[in-house]
Image (tube, grey):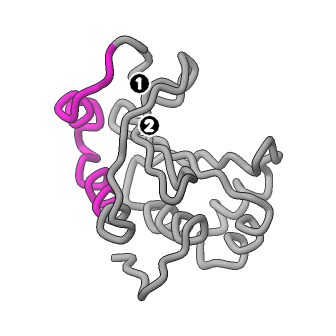
Amino acid sequence: MSKGIFTDKNHKPTEKEVYEVISSIKPLWEDLISFIEDNYKISGEFKFYGKNFGWALRYRKSGKVIISIYPGENEFMVQIILNGEEVKNALKSDISSETKEIIENKEPIREGKWIYLKVTSKTGLSDIKDLILVRSPLKKTRKRE
């Protein structure tokens, strides 16, 4: 099973197609996108990650990927790659015990731990924002809303 629903390399999904697929959780998608774009002043780009992952909305800052977001049926999956120091900082942060357990149980590969979190409700969105802030700290006052 793929991480995202859009697995045809020859068809980059449109915003309309993404919204149709994520359906009821569109407000959560928009909340996360606004958080990233408002705080980091960057735009996402769709990138194809292969048939096992599909298309993801990827956000990069200063040459590193902050987050990749894979749209799915009434959900979306995020991928955040944390290096060793970022893992330590994440585990010290205010994220939920469930998310801490996911991080602790994930085996490191290549550049760090590849953390995948599924979003189906508002629960967990706060953790994702905190992990983004760990991955790429803001210079000014953080805006978490």
> Looking at numbered disc 1 in the image, what kind of residue is underneath it?
Ile
The residue indicated by pointer 1 is 5
Gap between marks 2 and 1 measured at Cα: 8 Å
Residues in magenta, as a range: 11-34
Q: Position of residue 19 (x, y in %)?
A: 22, 37
Question: Is the C-beta separation of discs 2 and 1 under 8 Å?
Answer: yes
Please tell me in which quadrant of the rendered image residue 83 appears. bottom right
Q: Is residue 21 above or below residue 9?
A: below
| Left or right of residue 8, residue 63 in this image | right
Q: Residue at horizontal 47%, vertical 66%? A: 129
> Is 123 part of what is drawn in magenta?
no
> Is 32 part of what is drawn in magenta?
yes
Q: Residue at horizontal 39%, vertical 76%? A: 144
Q: Is residue 36 above or below residue 13?
A: below
> Looking at numbered disc 2 in the image, what kind of residue is underneath it?
Tyr
Q: Position of residue 45 (x, y in %)?
A: 36, 40
The residue indicated by pointer 2 is 70
| Left or right of residue 132, residue 12 in this image | left
